[in-house]
Amino acid sequence: MKDKIVFVVPCLRSGGAERVMILLANSLVEKGYRIEFIFTMDDVVSYELNPQIAISINYRNRNPLGQIKFIRKYMRQNKDAIYISFFTYQNLYTLIAKTFLPIKVVVSERNDPRKTLYGRRGLEWLRSVLYSGAYKVVFQTEEAKQFFSRRIQNKSVMIYNPLSPDLPDIFRGEREKRVVAVARLNKQKNLPMMISGIADFLKSYPEMCLEIYGEGDPRDPDMKSDLLELASKNGIRDRVRFMGFVQNVTEKICAASIYVNTSNYEGISNSMLEALAMGIPCVCTDCPVGGARMFIKEGINGYLVPVGNDREFSHALYRVESDKYMYKRCYDAAVVLREALSVDVITEQWENVVI
């Protein structure tokens, strides 16, 4: 029997990082590892988890101190395990919990490290101190890695997100007249820019619509109604559709004409990678920490636009729709991407980290 690996998470609610953890955990189980999840905040699981994977849930005190105590108690009873944490605050709690315990903790930065702690200098200092005590720190982009000290960089590893093995084949037929986005309804995703920037395009192509897949964020309860009001002001209320969270989102979007992402900041968007791997041209903001620019090749499989620039966003949509050879180039690029980001390839990279 191989090593025991424990993923420490608030819960497994819908989200890109959560999906990556599920893919990795399921793949590692198939390779013979003993896998367990610690849920520190909730018992929600939005994705299919291998039944061999155990779950321990914190049903008591869920404030930061309560989470740390719960993790530490588990660690004392499972000192032989290797622990993996993906979310910045969860990383801090997990590293605090391991203080003076002979335990390996691997933490991963999934987003722009300048944004995840909201500029709180004290917490940024604490993160630097704690990350120095991690076994390994996993980054997705070089730009994110450069934010940290040389000491942390020296124990860092670069690993991209894997593509799901259930991803639909690269679409070869006539594409449906839909522009699609997969985004939680919050400020980070800058959906007002998306709606403002796409208005003229939709008016020029009356057969087109915008579909936004993703659930609302409890921190922004009025976001959807505000976006609908903005769509009405731009004269495209009947052309913007909020689809909510769907389990099989890749099947829903695989035949779309264009994928869009207007985030103010982002690590590597899973939905963008999946769209590229299905041969969908992508128009995305070139936001920190540089995930999109690593995979979008200008004029080959999409276009990058400046953050917050709805005019350039609109121009890029027109360029994609008017380029009759774009889909052939996207197909060729998708074939290469699928090989590079297969679950087997990425799982092996994670194995090299934890072994």
Image (cartoon, grey):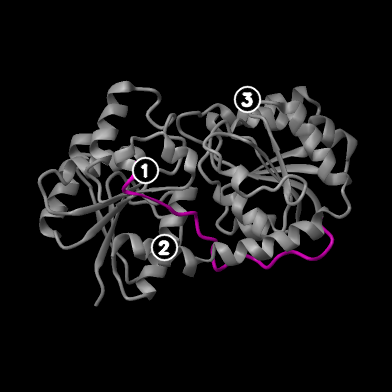
Dominant secondary structure (helix, strand or loop) of the stretch shown in magenta: loop
Residue holding disc 3 = 226
Relative horizontal placement of residue 246, taking residue 62 as reference (left or right): right
Relative horizontal placement of residue 273, taking residue 3 as reference (left or right): right
Is residue 14 visible to the viewer in this orientation of the structure? no
Q: Position of residue 126 (x, y in %)?
A: 25, 30
Residue holding disc 2 = 349
**Magenta segment boundaries in residue numbering:** 153-175
* Residue at x 37%, y 69% (from the top left corner): 28
The Cα–Cα distance between marks 3 and 2, rounded to whole angstroms, is 42 Å
The C terminus lies in quadrant: bottom left
Looking at marks 1 and 2 on the same chain, the residue that comes earlier in the sequence is marked by 1
Q: Residues within 10 Å of mark 1 (few under 14, many from 20)?
A: many
Looking at marks 3 and 2 on the same chain, the residue that comes earlier in the sequence is marked by 3
Relative horizontal placement of residue 268, taking residue 252 as reference (left or right): left
The Cα–Cα distance between marks 1 and 3, rounded to whole angstroms, is 28 Å
Q: Residues within 10 Å of mark 3 (few under 14, many from 20)?
A: few
Question: Given contact means CB atoms under 8 Å apart, are the residues at marks 1 and 3 in contact?
Answer: no
Name the front one of labels 1 and 3: 1
Name the front one of labels 1 and 2: 2
The kind of secondary structure element at disc 1 is loop
Depth check: 27 or 49 in front?
A: 27
Relative horizontal placement of residue 215, taking residue 95 as reference (left or right): right
Residue holding disc 1 = 87
Q: Quadrant of residue 205?
A: top right
- In the rendered structure, which amino acid carries the disc numbered 1? Phe
Depth check: 348 or 215 in front?
A: 348
Q: Position of residue 35 (x, y in %)?
A: 29, 65
